[in-house]
Amino acid sequence: MKKSYIITAAIVGLGLVSAGTVLAAGPLNGTGRQTMLDAKAKVMNMTATQLQTELQAGKTMADVAKSKNVTLDQLKTATMTAQEARLNALVKAGTMTQAQADERMAQIKDRQADCDGTGANRQAGNRGAGRGMGMRLHAK
């Protein structure tokens, strides 16, 4: 009986350590997408919630931008500026190195170059436009 408590405690402890590791990665985990959504919404004079509602209703980013008289280049510029500021803040906070930020920014620029605002390059459902980071992170 005592052994099972020790094993259970060890498993729970390992789970907590794993969860802590995931949570510690927070600034890189999902906030980039929110940064882009916020930047694009701001250029289109709407809130991120309003933009998300439009996208969930089936409109593409290009559709929403066109309805707001905003060009794809304006969206890309806003996204790049916001992402660069976010990455610079992460470097300053010590969350990532400058080399990591530079690599991430290069990946963002590469994806933005392919973006046509239609979501045609989406992977695996509603994970966002572009090629994503999945295979690229593991390609090295």
Image: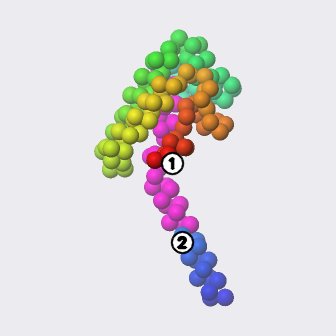
Q: Which amino acid lies under the numbered mark 2 shown in the image of this protein? A: Gly
SS under mark 1: helix
In-front residue for pair 46/110: 110
Work out which residue is located at the far front of the displayed protein and give it. Answer: 140
SS under mark 2: helix
In-front residue for pair 138/38: 138
What number is the disc on residue 13?
A: 2
Residue 126 on image: x %, y %: 64, 36
Do labels 1 and 2 touch, CB within 8 Å? no
Instruction: Give the dominant element type of the magenta stretch: helix, strand or loop.
Output: helix
**What residue do we see at 45% from left, 33% from top?**
108
Dot 1: few (<14), some (14–19), or many (≥20) neighbours within 10 Å? Answer: few
Q: Which amino acid lies under the numbered mark 1 shown in the image of this protein? A: His
Q: Is residue 2 magenta?
A: no
**What residue do we see at 52% from left, 30% from top?**
37
Residue 70 on image: x %, y %: 51, 14
> Above or below — where is 41 with respect to 106?
above
> Above or below — where is 21 with respect to 76?
below
From the viewer's perspective, tell me whether residue 86 is left or right of residue 72. Answer: left
Q: Is label 1 or label 2 in front?
A: 1
Residue 73 on image: x %, y %: 46, 17
Q: How far apart are marks 1 and 2 (CA)?
A: 28 Å
What's the magenta region? 15-43
Residue to which mark 1 is pinned? 138
Residue 85 on image: x %, y %: 36, 34
Q: Does the magenta stretch include residue 28?
A: yes
Dot 2: few (<14), some (14–19), or many (≥20) neighbours within 10 Å? Answer: few
* Residue 49 visible (yes or no): no
Work out which residue is located at the far top of the displayed protein and give it. Answer: 69
> Above or below — where is 94 with respect to 88?
below
Q: Give residue 14's quadrant in the image.
A: bottom right
